[in-house]
Image (spheres, rainbow, N blue to C red):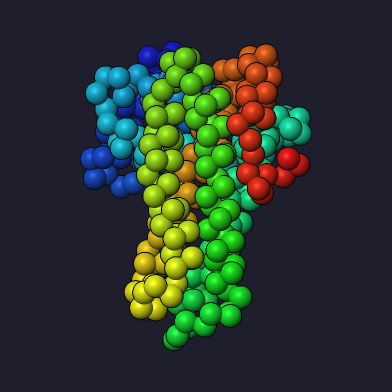
């Protein structure tokens, strides 16, 4: 199947996803199609559809179907990567971030069950620590934005990179607000604090998990296929200059 034919098949799938047709039935057909498409080909087809006027929001359903198809491919990709490879580091950081999100949900539930603010309760120190670690994820995003995304755009795959960058920008104020809440619990009524905390944690947990799945299963495999080995050497050097997160394994 040629790239043009694949693009037309993808367009039909997207039209069906947005037509009100049974989603699971459409996803089933999408999975069949996506099994035969490399990550770079999918990204190229998506980019062409965006350039032809399709809104990036309309691609979300297709992204989800692709994630379901390629979940096992992430394990295969990791086996191919040498320890210390930029993608290996980014994926391991994702693993750490996902653990943080699990802990954030537990913290939220523990605080929600409290009737009054208890200054010496360990959960508030845990909240501060998690909020600090989420602020540290900006170094992870900086490495992506300064080393991976520009090269994807150079290869004509700007759509996925642009979506990920927009999501970085969208999540940053939430991380800042969470960190501020953690440091200023006593500055507001406890019920108000719990309400704001729950809203920001729920948003970050949902959006960061979704964001990580898209990068692991679509963006990173595309970069792996498109970039030459010498480019990865340059990416690693530039990544060292930008710096790593306080939780980055082996760094």
The residue lying at 67 percent from left, 30 percent from top is: 240
The residue lying at 27 percent from left, 27 percent from top is: 54
The residue lying at 64 percent from left, 28 percent from top is: 241
Q: Is residue 84 left or right of residue 6?
A: right
Is residue 217 shown above or below 223? below
Give residue 90's position: percent from left, percent from top.
Answer: 62, 37
Give residue 112's position: percent from left, percent from top.
Answer: 45, 77
Give residue 21's position: percent from left, percent from top.
Answer: 27, 44
Asked where in the image residue 13 lies, by quadrant, the reply is top left
Residue 120 versus residue 158: which sits nearer the camera? 120
- Is residue 67 something one can see in this rendering? no
Q: Is residue 89 left or right of residue 160?
A: right
Asked where in the image residue 188 lies, by quadrant, the reply is bottom left
Residue 66 versus residue 82: which sits nearer the camera? 82
Residue 216 versus residue 61: which sits nearer the camera? 216
Which image quadrant: the N terminus?
top left
Which image quadrant: the C terminus?
top right
């Amino acid at each position: 199947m040629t790239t043009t034919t694949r693009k037309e098949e993808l367009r039909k799938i997207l039209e069906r996803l947005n037509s009100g047709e049974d989603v699971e039935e459409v996803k089933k057909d999408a999975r069949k199609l996506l099994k035969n498409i490399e990550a770079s080909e999918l990204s190229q087809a998506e980019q062409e559809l965006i350039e032809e006027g399709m809104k990036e929001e309309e691609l979300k359903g297709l992204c989800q179907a692709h994630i379901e198809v390629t979940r096992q491919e992430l394990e295969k990709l990791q086996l191919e990567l040498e320890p210390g490879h930029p993608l290996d580091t980014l994926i391991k950081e994702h693993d750490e971030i996902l653990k943080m999100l699990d802990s954030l949900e537990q913290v939220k539930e523990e605080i929600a069950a409290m009737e009054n603010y208890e200054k010496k309760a360990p959960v508030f120190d845990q909240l501060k620590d998690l909020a600090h670690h989420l602020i540290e994820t900006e170094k992870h995003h900086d490495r992506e934005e300064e080393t991976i995304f520009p090269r994807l755009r150079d290869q004509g795959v700007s759509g996925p990179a642009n979506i990920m960058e927009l999501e970085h920008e969208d999540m940053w104020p939430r991380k800042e607000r969470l960190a501020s809440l953690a440091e200023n619990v006593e500055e507001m009524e406890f019920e108000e604090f719990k309400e704001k905390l729950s809203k920001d944690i729920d948003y970050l947990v949902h959006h960061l998990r979704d964001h990580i799945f898209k990068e692991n299963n679509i963006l990173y495999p595309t970069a792996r296929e498109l970039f030459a080995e010498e480019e990865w050497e340059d990416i690693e050097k530039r990544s060292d200059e930008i710096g790593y997160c306080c939780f980055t394994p082996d760094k």
